[in-house]
Amino acid sequence: MGCSIKEIQTEAWVDALPRVEQLTSRELEVFTLLSHGSSNQTLADALFVSERTIRAHLTSIAIKLGLDSRLQLCLASHAHNHGCCIRPLHIVADDNSLAA
């Protein structure tokens, strides 16, 4: 028995948190703003850069943190900004033992 692919992917953002210190100051700005759920264009406007530059920063951040989706980046950003680093609970009902 092991973790399913889905479970491993949902925890990747937690494992990435210690690597946030590898980000440049500009990448950290982008990463911090990402927790608001803003679009690339909104991030670009806020930082006075192009959307293409934001995409490049997000790609670099994802590589440095070892994440492969925007959702994982957003979860890591939110946890980093709010000091949350609790592993998600995995509740799996694999039988009908609770059925009446």
Image: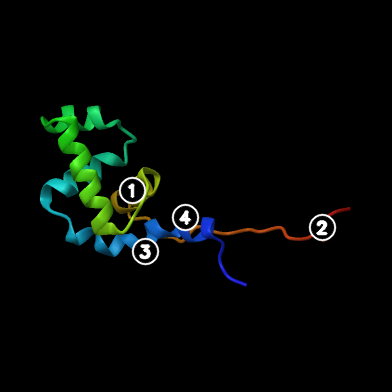
**Residue at the bottom extreme of this rendering:** 1
Question: Element type at marker 3?
Answer: helix
Q: How busy is the neighbourhood of tag 3: few (under 14 within 10 Å), some, or many (20 plus)?
A: some
Question: What is the distance, in whole Å, between disc 2 and disc 4 at their CAs?
Answer: 25 Å
What residue is shown with label 4?
Answer: 10
Q: Is mark 4 on a helix, strand or loop?
A: helix
Q: Residue 73 carries which label?
A: 1
Task: Decide which of tag 3 and tag 2 comes sooner along the chain.
Answer: 3
Write down the residue under mark 3.
15
Q: Residue 96 carries which label?
A: 2
| Residue type at tag 1 | Leu
Q: Which of marks 2 and 4 is nearer the N terminus?
A: 4
Disc 2 is placed on an element classified as loop
Percent across and percent down for residue 70 are: 35, 43
For label 2, the crowd category at 10 Å Cα-Cα, with few meaning under 14, some 14 to 19 and many 20 or more, is few
| Residue 83, x across and y down, in percent | 33, 55
Q: Which amino acid does label 2 sit on?
A: Asn
Q: Which of 25 and 85 is in front in this view?
A: 25
